[in-house]
């Protein structure tokens, strides 16, 4: 069982590469599904198989060929399937506040819902062993990071807030209802959240297990795109995911020698070298700019052949784990790989048995092993791409 995420800036070629990977895997005999998480879906268009797509329009998973399915996540549909009661409650709350029902319906789909819906499907496929490989055609980087951070965020919400809310509603609910018109959620609302959470159970572990899940960053040889790829690299490390390849797409091939493109070619060469240097720890795969848009099975096939002529895309190409807990004498330390970061950008807080690492707008709660929860952090140092945090002190029991 493998899960492979393809992500990167808008337009770099994520969907095309994810689709081509699907074709290659299916041909190698893996039962494969390519799932699009980008609200601006273009996965169906990449396959450009009008007849099959029309025939299976009503299906969630569309079969493209032997061993290959595609799915574009539809939030409204997934909500009805997985989260109808919770959604109804939120909608009714919004309705009471004077919004008309159509607007309430729109707003009730709060940010992060696409990602949660996708996670629900993925966890279902994992539990039911429906596929050998799940390829995720992710949204541009920011949303993809939200996607991978949701399992730990939910975990945190459930253990810190949810129980409290539930007790509060049980105790104070009847009183509040007498004095205000706001409906208090019934116990089945909480039961539904609990059910939803149960359906997601285990997905956090799956995402950070490098034997199952790896991320492939798609980039182009351009300054701004490479810059974003560096940030993405660091953030995926922050969330504990293993990146096992960087794909540089849209490289001008040698044959292009028109004077008009000279500057472009020189600049691409410069950024390719820079990328090879930045990402030297992981394999880098290069893809030329084709002479035309890559649509339809034939084009995707050609792309798959250039990318994976001698390799199996289901393999795992790097095993580096972003976190490592170690003990030397009485000192414990947590090493985190966080490349491309300066120390001014990092915020660290230890709170009981968790360490909270903040970088920019992103926050990661790292559950500490039990042995560390009662110790004090006695230093944090960023050397090269390693953040090393030391923990010392006596046990307090
Ligand atoms: N190497 C390439 N050569 C030619 N066209 C490409 C190449 N990679 C991507 N494209 C084209 O670029 C467009 C955007 O690619 P797409 O995969 O949809 O990007 P993303 O999913 O990252 O937004 C598509 O029309 C696709 O066919
Ligand atoms: Mg896309």
Image (tube, helix red, strand yellow):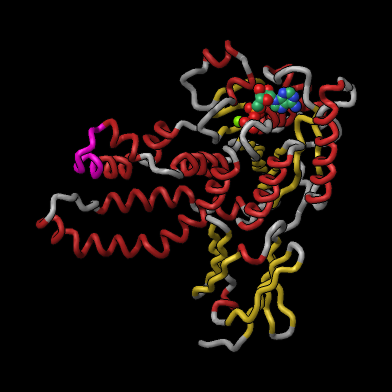
Q: Position of residue 78 (x, y in %)?
A: 43, 35
**Quarter of the view holding residue 249:** top right
**Quarter of the view holding residue 218:** top right
Which residues are the magenta region? 92-101
- The correct choice, above or below, for 35 with respect to 350 in the image is above
In this orientation, which residue lies closer to the viewer: 353 or 364? 364
Per the picture, the main secondary structure of the magenta-coloured stretch is helix
User: In this rendering, would 269 be left or right of 56?
Assistant: right
User: In this rendering, would 93 be left or right of 40?
Assistant: left
In this orientation, which residue lies closer to the viewer: 17 or 57? 17
Residue 382 among magenta residues: no
Whether residue 53 is visible, yes or no, is yes
- The correct choice, above or below, for 250 with respect to 229 in the image is above
Q: Position of residue 371 (x, y in %)?
A: 59, 78
Q: Residue at coordinates 37% horizontally, 41% vertically from top-left?
A: 83
Residue that extends furthest to the top in the rendered view of this protein = 51
On-image quarter of the N terminus: top right
In this orientation, which residue lies closer to the viewer: 106 or 252? 252
User: In this rendering, would 373 be left or right of 212?
Assistant: left
- The correct choice, above or below, for 283 with respect to 49 in the image is below
Q: Residue at coordinates 81% horizontally, 26% vertically from top-left?
A: 305
Q: Position of residue 95 (x, y in %)?
A: 22, 39
Q: Residue at coordinates 46% horizontally, 55% vertically from top-left?
A: 154
Q: Residue at coordinates 24% horizontally, 45% vertically from top-left?
A: 93
Whether residue 27 is visible, yes or no, is no
Q: Position of residue 64 (x, y in %)?
A: 62, 21
In this orientation, which residue lies closer to the viewer: 135 or 48? 48
Splitting the image into four quadrants, where does ligand 1 fall? top right
């Amino acid at each position: 069982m493998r899960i492979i995420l393809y992500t990167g800036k808008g337009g770099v070629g994520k969907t095309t590469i994810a689709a081509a990977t699907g074709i290659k895997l299916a041909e190698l005999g893996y039962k494969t599904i390519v799932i699009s998480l980008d609200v601006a879906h273009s996965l169906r268009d990449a396959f450009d198989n009008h007849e099959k797509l029309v025939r299976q329009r009503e299906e969630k998973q569309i079969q493209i060929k032997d061993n290959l399915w595609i799915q574009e996540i539809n939030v409204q549909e997934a909500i009805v399937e997985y989260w109808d009661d919770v959604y109804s409650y939120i909608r009714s709350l919004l309705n009471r506040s004077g919004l008309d029902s159509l607007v309430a319906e729109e707003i009730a789909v709060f940010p992060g819902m696409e990602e949660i819906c996708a996670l629900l499907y993925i966890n279902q496929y994992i539990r039911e062993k429906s596929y050998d490989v799940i390829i995720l055609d992710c949204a541009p980087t920011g949303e993809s990071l939200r996607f991978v951070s949701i399992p730990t965020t939910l975990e945190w919400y459930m253990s810190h807030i949810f129980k409290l809310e539930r007790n509060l509603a049980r105790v104070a609910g009847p009183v509040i209802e007498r004095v205000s018109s706001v409906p208090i959620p019934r116990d089945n609302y909480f039961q539904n959240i609990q059910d939803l959470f149960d359906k997601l159970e285990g997905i956090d572990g799956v995402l950070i297990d490098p034997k199952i899940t790896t991320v492939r960053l798609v980039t182009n040889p351009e300054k701004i795109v490479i810059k974003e790829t560096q940030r993405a690299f660091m953030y995926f490390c922050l969330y504990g995911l293993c990146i096992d390849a960087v794909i540089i797409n849209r490289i001008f091939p040698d044959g292009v020698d028109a004077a008009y493109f000279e500057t472009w070619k020189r600049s691409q060469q410069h950024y390719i070298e820079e990328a090879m240097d930045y990402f030297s720890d992981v394999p880098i795969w290069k893809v030329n700019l084709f002479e035309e848009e890559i649509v339809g099975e034939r084009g995707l096939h050609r792309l798959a052949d250039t990318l994976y002529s001698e390799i199996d895309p289901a393999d795992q190409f790097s095993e580096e784990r972003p976190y490592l807990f170690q003990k030397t004498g009485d000192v414990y330390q947590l090493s985190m790989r966080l490349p491309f970061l300066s120390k001014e950008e990092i915020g660290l807080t230890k709170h009981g048995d968790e360490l909270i690492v903040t970088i920019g707008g992103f926050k990661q709660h790292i559950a500490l092993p039990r042995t560390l929860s009662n110790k004090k952090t006695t230093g944090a140092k960023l050397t090269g791409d390693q953040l090393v945090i030391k923990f010392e002190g006596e046990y307090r029991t």
